Amino acid sequence: MGVTQIANRLGIAKSAIHRHLQGLTERGYLTQNQSTARYTLGPKAYLIGRLAPGIEDVAAAADGPMREARDKVGLTTVLTAPSMSGMVVLKTVHGTTAIAIGARPGSELPMHASAQGFVTLAFGPALHLERTLRQPLVPLTAHTITEPETLKAIVETVRRDGYATAPEQALLGINALAAPVFNAAGELVAAAAIVSSIQFVPAEPDAGMIAAVVEMARQISRNLGHGYAGPRPAQ
């Protein structure tokens, strides 16, 4: 729905409704389509009630590809969705190693200091990058990107390569390798990643690991209808 429709339904002034919508969007309970300006339930709403249209489909579409990638590399796979304040963890499939590092569903990763955030800044709506650059880039470790120009350069590299890493930028000793997930309309809806210690996911991952993550993201995207034109008509 749009602001006017919601205001009419509730009998509340549009200005008041707009403030409420902005607050809920900033906290991840709503998302706003930048093309239509309409609002839908967001990833936080999915996590507390599993009611968000689209987000639940993403989690379901990701299950098989996430498990396949986990089995291939032995490391934890994580699915996150963007909110206005960061990347919300929707789903985790724990690795098969003796010590598996994961991310708790519902937790939020910083946009400026995570591989998943870099993917969203590169492939998501421009508002995410604009908003991130307007705010202080808070240093979480000695490796966190704190200079706007450096962050812009990283985003361009991710856009070119199709994947992102963030070695020790949010937490010392931890790295992630992430790739974008798109829906049938070609919109970024999530980031698929593997997460582990820097020992297993180095700053420069090998080609096999990169291929596994990119393929995981592609398979999830395909399950959501991205890149599928439908059956060809009979000749």
Image: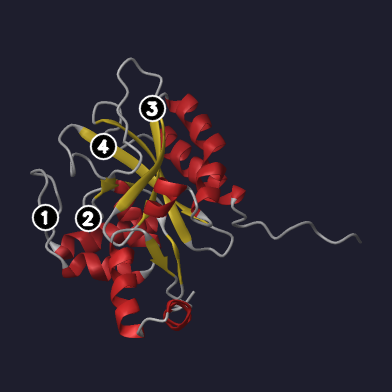
Q: Indicate which disc, 3 or 2, sits on the residue closer to the N terminus.
A: 3
As measured in the structure, the alpha-carbon distance from the residue carrying label 3 to the one carrying label 2 is 23 Å
Label annotation for residue 175: 4
Residue at horizontal 48 percent and vertical 48 percent from the top: 50
Q: Indicate which disc, 2 or 4, sits on the residue closer to the N terminus.
A: 2
Residue beneath label 2, please?
A: 112
Q: Are marks 1 and 2 in contact (CB under 8 Å)?
A: yes
Nearest to viewer (mark 3 / mark 1): 1
Please, what secondary structure does the residue beneath circle 1 have? loop
Residue beneath label 1, please?
A: 138
Q: Is 17 situated above or below 151?
A: below
Residue at horizontal 45 percent and vertical 48 percent from the top: 49
Q: Is residue 51 left or right of residue 77?
A: right
Please, what secondary structure does the residue beneath circle 4 have? strand
Amino acid at the residue labelled 4: Asn
Amino acid at the residue labelled 1: Val
Q: Indicate which disc, 3 or 4, sits on the residue closer to the N terminus.
A: 3
Q: Is residue 72 left or right of residue 92?
A: right
Q: Is 150 situated above or below 213?
A: below
